[in-house]
Image (spheres, rainbow, N blue to C red):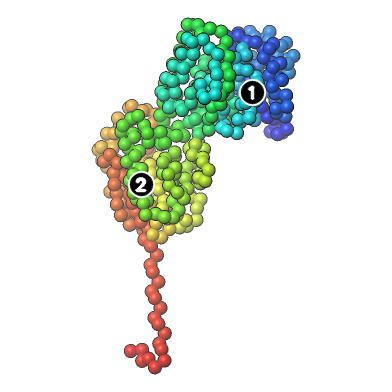
Amino acid sequence: MRASSDIPELSIVVTVWSREHNLPKLLPSLRGALRGLVSGDQILVAAGPEMDHLAPVVEANGATLVIATRDGYGDILRAGIGRARGRFVLTMDGDFSHLPKFVRTMWHNRFEGEVVIGSRYVRGAYAEMEMARRLASRALNTVYRKGLSVPFRDISSGFRMYRQEVLEDIQPLEASGLDVLLEILVKAICQGWNVVEVPYWYRGSGPWTRARALRLGSDYARTVGRLVSLRNSIRAADYDHRAFDSWIPLQRYWQRARFQIVQGYLADVSGRVLDIGCGSSRIVQTLPDVIGMDLALRKLRWLRAPGRALVQGDLTRLPFEDGAFDAVVCSEVIEHIPVEQVRLEELVRVLAPGGVLVLGTPDYGRWTWRSLEWVYGKVFPNGYVHEHINRYTFSELGPELERLGLRVQDCRYVGASEMIFEARRPPLPERASSPEPLRAGSTGG
């Protein structure tokens, strides 16, 4: 294991793509920008095959040349990132369109997010580009921002800074062209990492030729289907959150109806609430005094907020004391777990006497759910359908809750398909009052 003193604070990956560069001017300027900024740095110049002639100017400026096996932008960027050892990794182009002095701006924003995008299109930014290129870039960013549900304005910017753990978490990267920028961003968002944009002054290099525009469009089109599928799968950390406001009416209705039923069951709960398998649901985001628990670290990472209590764990053995909660919510969880690992008695164990269990799962005894699931699986093959490995019915689950000592109070349905139980744990019996002691002179009769 490498000693911590050997790890530079910042690695900078300078990409030389399409043989366009201004390294004799860029590298000395970059060295000057780094002076006094970090205690240790690493500069890597990543280029395509047959670019070994760059070695003299690269080495003269204390940098390292990295030669990729292929000449696509994604291939070059991945080669550079693969050699980066810094705690933070900044990427920039070698044509001087990303001014070295703005490296300081990126560095000073390193704690604002795990991914920092140098943006040309946020307030305070300025971009020197000819009109045709500006319009094409704006249109491209708008289309992919909407299509991928990515709330950022400059998703095609290559001027970025990442924490090293982000780059390790999103591997493997597959894109070989400019679409690698989309792939990195979407994967980082789906893993729950925080992304921010900061304004900077961009100096566009060269005209926006038709050939370059077509290449950029084809690169993005090649990967967009895969990324759209990822964004709309349960692997996305913000899946439940986005579904609440989904453009698909049925999905939006489903999330909101479930939320209203659960909130109704919890209306009179004033104590602590545990949301098991919380995902990115609105329950955790809106309820006070709630603890969110999920097995997927990416979901908890996305949910991070001041004052919000989050725990990583699973249903096999809940990491809480007996009777710790006045309410336990477990919605859309047990159908995803192997039957031998479903421990409903654990839900009862952590529930205080008189507390309420809210348990939701699809009712496979109803044809409406079976039909909807079949259709959904055809439309969204990367959705949740194939992860439903336990199929519960009302006639099975209701008696099971009663067997565990709960009293089923109610069961409501979402779309005549998903059942949500309200079950109460009986309160402790009240102690019988002690008889009053006999007074003097009393016969007791």
Other residues around mark 1 within 10 Å, as few (<14) / some (14–19) / many (≥20)? many
Please tell me in which quadrant of the rendered image residue 442 appears: bottom left
Reply above or below: 418 against 92.
below
Dot 2 amino acid type: Val
Q: Residue at x 34, y 34 (%)?
A: 252
The earlier-in-sequence mark between 1 and 2 is 1
Query: Which residue appears at 70% of the width and 23% of the height?
Result: 34
Q: Which residue, given by chain and number where applicable, does mark 2 sit on?
A: 262
Residue holding disc 1: 103
Is residue 403 rendered to the left or right of residue 308?
Answer: left
Residue 127 spot, x, y in % from top left: 54, 16
* Residue 404 percent coordinates (x, y): 37, 56
Question: How far, Cα to Cα, is label 1 from label 2?
Answer: 48 Å
Instruction: Find residue 32 and report its horizontal and vertical position in percent.
Output: 71, 20
Residue under the point 33% across and 27% down? 379
Q: Quadrant of the C terminus?
A: bottom left
